[in-house]
Amino acid sequence: MAGQFRSSVWDPILIIAQIVTIQCVFYLSLGFWISIVDFIAGNYCSLEQFFSFEVLQFKDLQGKLLMIAYILNALTSAGGLWYVVQRTKQCWDFAATAHVSHFIACWLYNARF
């Protein structure tokens, strides 16, 4: 298999390491953007901003800035996804895995669907 970037051998350790890395990139970049947003708005960072849907509202400045932080996090996570996975066929899988695990974490945190 000389000349190919990656072999087609099933490597579960590599896949698990990539999933963990993508999750770390997702939450670290989200924490970075939320801390910047909180600095601008003069608020304190809390887990509510990561996992609660109730803080994402258009009616106040904090909610709008938090939505901007999530949009910037999507761009940052896409860059991290491209750097870590480096295969277009697998990027959708890893992105879906990151968002499904975030959905489950939000569901557990809020204790409701």
Image (cartoon, rainbow, N blue to C red):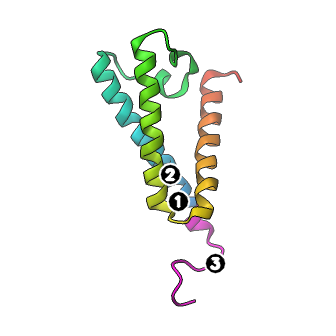
Q: CA distance from mark 2 to mark 1?
A: 6 Å
- Given this view, does label 3 or label 1 mark the residue nearer the observer? 3
The disc at residue 8 is 3
Q: CA distance from mark 2 to mark 3?
A: 21 Å
Q: At x 65% / y 28%, what residue is drawn?
A: 107
> Closer to the N terminus: mark 2 or mark 3?
3
Which amino acid lies under the numbered mark 1 shown in the image of this protein?
Gln
In the picture as drawn, the residue positioned furthest to the right comes out as 113
User: Mark 2 sits on what residue?
Assistant: 22
Quadrant where the C terminus is found in the figure: top right
> Closer to the N terminus: mark 3 or mark 1?
3
Query: Is 31 placed left or right of 97 in the picture?
Result: left
Q: Which residues are magenta?
A: 1-15
- Would residue 67 be seen by someone viewing this image from the given angle? yes
Asked which quadrant contains residue 52, the reply is top right
Asked which quadrant contains residue 60, the reply is top left
Pinpoint residue 43: horizontal percent, then vertical percent.
Answer: 33, 16
Of 68 and 33, which appears nearest the observer? 68
CA neighbours of label 1 inside 10 A, class few (<14), some (14 to 19), many (20+):
some
Q: CA distance from mark 3 to mark 1?
A: 16 Å
